[in-house]
Image (cartoon, helix red, strand yellow):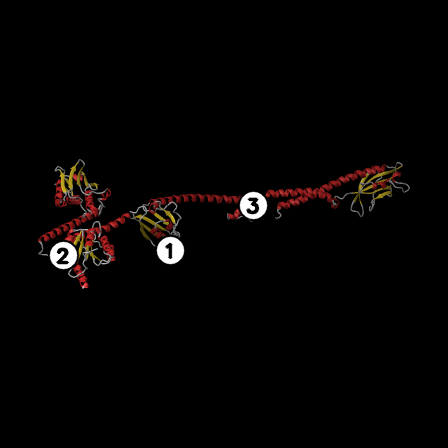
Amino acid sequence: MNELDSPPGGAGRRWRVLLVDDHPHVLRVLRLTLEKEGFEVATAANGQEALFVAELRTPDAVVTDIQMPRMNGREFCAALNDLYPARTFPIFVMTSMTERSEREWSSAMRDVVFLEKPVSPRELAARLVARRDEACGGAE
Amino acid sequence: MRANRATLVLLVSAVFAAVALAAALAHHQAGVRRSEVHSQGAGLARALSSLPYETLVPGNGGRGVLANLLAVPGNADLGYGVVVDTGGRPVAEVVAPGTVVPAASLSTDPSAWFGEHRLAVPGDARPIREFFGPVLKDGALAGWVRVGFFEPAVWSIGDQWQMLLLAALPVLVLTLAGWTVLRLELRPIVRIGGEIERLARAASIPMEADAARYGGDLIERLGRFLAVVDARLRDLEQQRASAVTGSRLLAFRKARVEQVLQSLPDPILLLDDAGQIAFASPKLAHLLSSDTEQAVGRDAAEWCGIEPVARLLGRYRAGNELASRADSVEYVPANAPERRVAVYALPLPALHGSTGTVAVFRDVTQQHLARTAGDEFVAHVSHELKTPLQVLTMYSELLQDQPDGDPALRIEAANAIHDQAMRMAGLIGNLLSISRIESGTITVERTRVKLLELLRETVDSLAHKAASAGVNLQLRAGNDLTPLHLDKGLFSIALQNLVGNAIKYNRPGGSVTVTAVETDTAVELRVKDTGIGMSPDDARRAFDKFVRGSDPEAVGREGHGLGLYLARQIVELHHGEIGVTSEPGVGSEFVVTLRKTPQLMAQALS
């Protein structure tokens, strides 16, 4: 599927983070923050767009909002799993919904992390850095 | 069959009658015989007396006439025939065997030559009746001729047994017949007597135990029995009358109670101890999609077709340990999936040893919707607040991390923060207003307001928003509008929401027109847009709380679903009306009508 792909976690390669949110402000600020940390950022305004981008280049991490028009976060995650059944990259889900049902489905899926809004960009960056270091360290 | 008086009397009198009859007959017969004998005897005596002496007394021992006497049949009673001389000595005689001629003295007096007399025979019980006559020889008394007959004994039953039988037979036959008839006639009375006794016993009336007596006794008993029965009947009649009244009253009360039960807004199901239906409100047919006409007597759990309800009802029967505990369940009616019905099962306290359960069916759609709406509201508000907070967090962090960074970024951050803060303020303001209005704590402070000014203020405050949305915002209102007494703060919120919506749910290149028109009776405000419009269903619900509409286009735009609701509340606080006409893809027009009430038009005091 991805001819342009290089093995994930390879040292020296910048991590690709896919940001999905329908609020342009969120995309803007997170992009700035993550790029500062050395991530390569791709953005999408909704799930469909994000799937398109993800298919082009396998991301190393996905950060997505839940409340989006046309395809919500849950559907998006399910679609990602279909696209990458043996997915090794984590999905971070940002949500303001604290209902149990939200936690249930996110914990039922493998490697889906629940982030409650408001999400601090610093915190998110830190978590992504940690994952990257872990992955890179492991592949060594 | 016991011998009873009548029978006894009959029998005895029959016997007496027979005997009397027989005796009479015998007597009569004896009398007849006697006269026979008499005539025979007297005749014989005369006849013999008239015979010449020589005939009577044969000289030379020859047979005399006397001998023929005995030979003549029919002279069974003849005892003897004898000729005696004047001294009484027999000169010729014929005597029945075994008979002795009794002595007799006869008078020589010619007046007494013929006669009869009775003589006793020694050694013989039977007396003799003798007839005598003179015997003349040569014209002078030579003696007498004496003919003696045995007198029949009247009471000799032995001779008379045939006659007795003859007499007794008819008598006995008559008696028997009479007795039989009597018995036949009396049998019904006997039966009545028996019946009376039976009835008396059955009705617990004491009667003497003797059903077989006739006559006045029976009539008396019958009379007494009838008196008692009559009293009883009257008693029963009274009881019946009061029972009828009582049952009518009961039926009326029952009908009343059933009326009440049937008219209750919450239909009920009444179960007995065994879990069977004792009463079912007709309204249940609609809620349960089960027939209520034939429900009574059926097992409730079986009759009810809805699973969770049937399970609940099935618990309420004798022997089930859960039967004494109230419980409830909710279900969705099959024929009304948008509704929710709660069933409350309440065990009844024991009444005359029987318990039972009443199940109340209540439409809890509203509560359910409220609950759901409440949950949705909380989720909604939390989301609405968290989104601006997210932006605030991000930009503030950005500013913190890059204090000397790109000034353009700093400006962008400041603007974003400001916008979001304003947005949050708007939402919170709306929520507070709604809360105050709904709880009734709001006070409408009317001041004299020039509508044109208010409208201009609103339009001005939203001008930049309209500009950035590419929407043309226009105001058409004259300066001649009568000043109105409105709560300026509240009313401007309502206008803000209406005009803000018109801009928000619009398209680049579209327009929003605000007009105000005054008539004799009202003031009309119109906010017309060329935006995305609403379907008729959405238009109907546009003013409901938290309703964002079903159009994804609308949902995509930021909104809380509170603006129109609040606008309506405010308009209605001012005794006005608000409505909308809309067409999807064309646009919407909101109309606020304020009737010119004295309150609205009051002249300013100052």
Residue drawn at (39%, 44%) of the image: B251
Vertical order, A126 against B124 (above or below): below
| Mark 1 and mark 3: Cα distance apart in space | 60 Å
Q: In front: B499, or B108?
A: B499
Provide the residue designation for mark 2. Answer: A35
Q: Tell me the subunit letter for badge 2.
A: A
Q: Amino acid at mark 1?
A: Asn
Quarter in which the C terminus of chain B is drawn: top left
Q: Amino acid at mark 2?
A: Glu
| Kind of element beneath mark 3 | helix
Q: Which of the numbered marks, if any, corresponds to residue B320? A: 1
Q: Earlier in the sequence, mark 1 or mark 3?
A: 3
Q: Is residue B568 visible?
A: yes
Q: Are marks 2 and 1 in contact (CB under 8 Å)?
A: no
Q: Nearer the viewer, mark 1 or mark 3?
A: 1
Q: Nearer the viewer, mark 2 or mark 1?
A: 2
Provide the residue designation for mark 3. Answer: B193
Image coords of residue B223 (percent x, y): 53, 43
Q: In front: B349, or A1?
A: A1
| Kind of element beneath mark 1 | loop
Specify whether B36 is left or right of B419. Answer: right
Q: Tell me the subunit letter for badge 1.
A: B
Image coords of residue B112 (percent x, y): 82, 38
| Mark 3 and mark 2: Cα distance apart in space | 127 Å
